[in-house]
Amino acid sequence: MEKRYWRKRNGMELVQVAILVAIAVAIGLIFKTQITDFVNDTFSGLDNFN
């Protein structure tokens, strides 16, 4: 019985990770332009720092 419990628990953890990855990808797609602008501004600021 314990082996089945651990198998089910591992399966649930995999589902949770898959859901979190899907949410992260969706947020990345939604805010793609803002993220790109932020990264470009950050790196251009670093280039001007020298």
Image (spheres, rainbow, N blue to C red):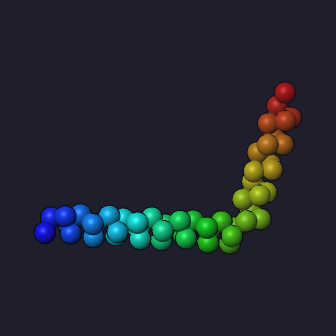
Residue 36 position in % (x across, y down): 77, 58
Residue 38 position in % (x across, y down): 75, 53
Task: Specify the quadrant that holds the N terminus.
Answer: bottom left
Q: Identify the residue shown where x is 27% and y is 66%.
A: 7
| Front residue (pair 32, 38) | 32
Residue 22 position in % (x across, y down): 55, 70
- For this view, does 33 lie left or right of residue 48? left
Task: Specify the quadrant that holds the C terminus.
Answer: top right
| Front residue (pair 16, 5) | 5
How many discs appear? 0
Q: Identify the residue shown where x is 69% and y is 70%.
A: 29
- For this view, does 29 lie left or right of residue 13? right
Residue 6: image quadrant is: bottom left
Q: Is residue 3 above or below residue 44?
A: below
Q: Identify the residue shown where x is 68% and y is 72%.
A: 30
Extreme residue in the top direction: 50
| Front residue (pair 45, 13) | 13
Q: Identify the residue shown where x is 65% and y is 65%.
A: 28
Residue 11 position in % (x across, y down): 34, 69
- For this view, does 22 lie left or right of residue 15? right
